[in-house]
Image: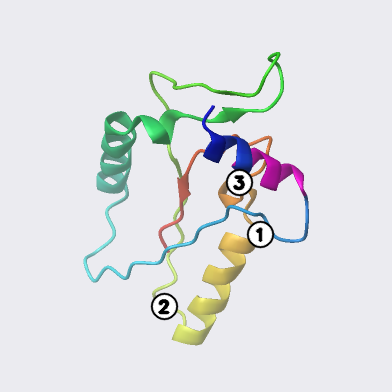
């Protein structure tokens, strides 16, 4: 593992109320939602970028390891919020990224990415 990855693991094990590495990015898209197209795009990105297939394994080995897997799948969930008022959409979006364990990087999750189009 690199020094950066070791530091990330140390941050994860440090605990606290908020995960140390929980990046949330929102990108508005005006086009109609196409779940199968999003799945194909996510699969392609994960195939092309080894970093997205490389969880950190803090246990189970003599030393922590970053193992590049030959294949992996990004977690995707989708919920249609278009019929809700904008303020309600924002509240639900924030709750989704705060409370959905699929999008919180922990020592157990290894740090693979997830996406939640809403």
The answer to whether one can see residue 85 in this image is no
Q: Secondary structure at mark 3?
A: loop
Closer mark to the observer between disc 1 and disc 3: 3
Describe residue 96's horizontal placement relative to residue 106 as left or right: left
Asked if residue 12 shows in the view, the reply is yes
Task: Answer left or right for 90 relative to 64.
Answer: left
**Cα gap from disc 1 to disc 2, whole angstroms:** 22 Å
Local secondary structure at mark 2? loop
Residue 82: image x %, image y %?
A: 39, 74
Q: Which residue is mark 1?
A: 99
Q: Earlier in the sequence, mark 2 or mark 3?
A: 2
Q: Badge 2: how crowded within 10 Å, few (<14), some, or many (20+)?
A: few
Q: CA distance from mark 2 to mark 3?
A: 30 Å
Task: Work out how far the residue at label 1 is from the one at label 3, CA to CA, in angstroms.
Answer: 12 Å
Using a 10 Å C-alpha cutoff, classify the residue at mark 3 as few (fewer than 14 neighbours), some (14 to 19) or many (20 or more): some
Quick one: 112 or 90, which is closer to the camera? 112
Pick whichever of labels 1 and 3 is earlier in the sequence: 1
Residue with the mark numbered 2: 83
Q: Which mark is residue 40?
A: none
Q: Which residues are magenta?
A: 8-14
**Residue of label 3:** 105
Q: Is 95 a magenta residue?
A: no
Q: Position of residue 12 (x, y in %)?
A: 69, 45
Please tell me which residue lies in front, 83 or 42.
42
Across and down, in percent, residue 67 comes to 50, 21
Lower position in the chain sequence, tag 1 or tag 2: 2
Check disc 1: other Cα within 10 Å, few if <14, some if 14-19, many if 20+. few
Q: Position of residue 10 (x, y in %)?
A: 69, 41
Q: Secondary structure at mark 1?
A: helix
At x 43%, y 29%, the residue is 53
């Amino acid at each position: 593992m690199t020094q950066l990855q070791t530091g990330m693991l140390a941050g994860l094990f440090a605990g606290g109320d908020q995960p140390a590495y929980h990046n949330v990015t929102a990108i508005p898209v005006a086009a109609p939602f196409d779940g199968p197209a999003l799945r194909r795009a996510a699969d392609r990105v994960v195939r092309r970028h080894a970093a997205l297939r490389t969880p950190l394994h803090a246990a189970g080995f003599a030393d922590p390891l970053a193992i590049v897997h030959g294949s992996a799948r990004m977690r995707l969930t989708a919920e249609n919020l278009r019929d809700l008022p904008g303020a309600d959409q924002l509240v639900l979006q924030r709750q989704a990224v705060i409370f959905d364990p699929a999008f919180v990087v922990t020592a157990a999750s290894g740090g693979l990415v997830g996406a939640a189009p809403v």
